[in-house]
Image: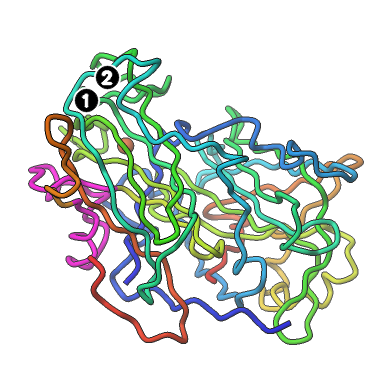
Amino acid sequence: MATAQQTAGPYWHMIDFPEWADTTRFGDEGPRITLTGVIRDGAGAPVTDAMVEIWHADPAGRYDAAFQGFGRCRTDAEGRFRFTTLKPGPVPGRGNAMQAPHVLVAIFARGLMRHLLTRLYFAGEPLNETDPLLALVPEARRPSLIARESAPGVWTLDIRLQGEGETVFLEV
Amino acid sequence: MSDPTPYAPHAPGSQPPLDAPAYGSTHKRHPKLAPIRAPLTLTEATSPRLTPERFPPEADMSRVNGKDALGQRIIVGGRVLDEAGRPVPHAMVEVWQANAAGRYHHPGDTHDAPLDPNFLGRARLFTDAEGWYRYTTIQPGAYPWRNHHNAWRPVHIHYSLFGAGFAQRMVTQMYFPGDPLLPLDPIFNAVPDEAARDRLIARFDLELTVPEWALGYRFDIVLRGPAATPFEEDHA
Ligand SMILES: [Fe+2]
């Protein structure tokens, strides 16, 4: 039996290091992108004390390279997270499937007894049409996983923890 | 390339629900729709490269710039294993906690208790090749938290762990034996299974205790294991 999880609580910022929001800080080369969005609760209020982590493949779709691919960021007073990273490539899925480029997103916060897992996909990727995970999501809820390019190189995806437009969360 | 081995689902009752009504902050923050069960892929079966070179360890919270923090010095140690009983080697573990007076070194903590200039309250460690970890700190104090009338958190240390796959990622809290606040705490008691709750409580350990120096506490942590391997239920 795995150890029980417990909320990160309100003071997880003790392990917040702002530079972790930039996965390229160890020198990974390539065009940088920004991943950003606002996290809201069931009342539509911004979640201003969340810890957000990302994990994704390198631009060639590999996880075994030297690329860091991991970031951590706190949401600000507007509930916004903001990462600087490199855009991941398509990643092999199970069997012979190919997954569309995506970023694993984990959310920790006061009021979350366990962290939540979701994914961020990129609008306009042809592989989105055949991605095995997106195929499991009812069509009406897929937009909650697909970031749009709100400015060149800036990909935006808002996250709703509860209620209208609730984000699709994953159990792996 | 062969497919990664799925992780076993969590044992019933071993994990707290997201909807925990006695913990007020969950009301507006827990998703109401069921999660999508996703197949395990490389994304969840791999984990970031968190090396001591890039993330320097600091395993002593009991002093700052050579000056001792106030309070009971303790050593906390244990083993990180998976559900198959295998050690989780070279795993990054982050811990954070309140000081001996029950105050966090954090601008959001307004509890009327003194800060200690010689106590920051965070550490970063890596398990060794056999999954062992250990750090030195000060016994934290209990603190009030406004969840309900006269609400006090039992004494605890927060833990964050990374395994070999992101699906093993976990954040938890370690408690101390004999704490009278434990039966009253909505966060601890959100875990349905009594044995699972008991495993969140460290044990006093004379082996870890260092003569003339610090009390020792043992706290083992079990991360999710592979579905294909039979479970060993007893790592507590
Ligand atoms: Fe705490």
From this view, report whether residue A76 is shown above or below residue A81.
above
Indicate if the residue with disc 1 has its beta carbon within 8 Å of ligand 1.
no
Amino acid type, callout 1? Ala
Q: Is residue B186 magenta?
A: yes
- Residue A75 in the figure: left or right of residue A15: right
Tell me the residue that label 2 is attached to. B69
Question: Who is closer to the viewer here, B68 or B174?
Answer: B68
In magenta segment, residue B72: no
Q: Which residues are magenta?
A: B174-202
The spot of residue A93 in percent (x, y) is 73, 77
Q: Earlier in the sequence, mark 2 or mark 1?
A: 2
At x 77% / y 44%, what residue is drawn? A85
**Residue type beneath disc 2:** Ala
Picture coordinates of residue B224 (x, y %)?
42, 69
Secondary element at tag 1: loop
Binning the other alpha carbons within 10 Å of mark 2 as few (below 14), some (14 to 19) or many (20 upward) gives many
* Residue at 82%, 78% in the rendered image: A130
- For this orientation, the residue located farthest to the front is B211
Residue bearing mark 1: B100
Left or right side of A4 for A148: right
Q: Quadrant of the C terminus of chain A?
A: bottom right
Q: Is residue A51 above or below residue B197?
A: above
Contact (CB < 8 A) between labels 2 and 1?
Answer: yes
The chain carrying label 2 is B
- Give the percent coordinates (x, y) of residue B78: 29, 54
Which one is nearer the viewer's eye here, A159 or B46? B46
Q: Both on one chain, marks 2 and 1?
A: yes
Q: Is residue B77 left or right of residue B203?
A: right
Image position, residue B187 (x, y; %): 27, 49
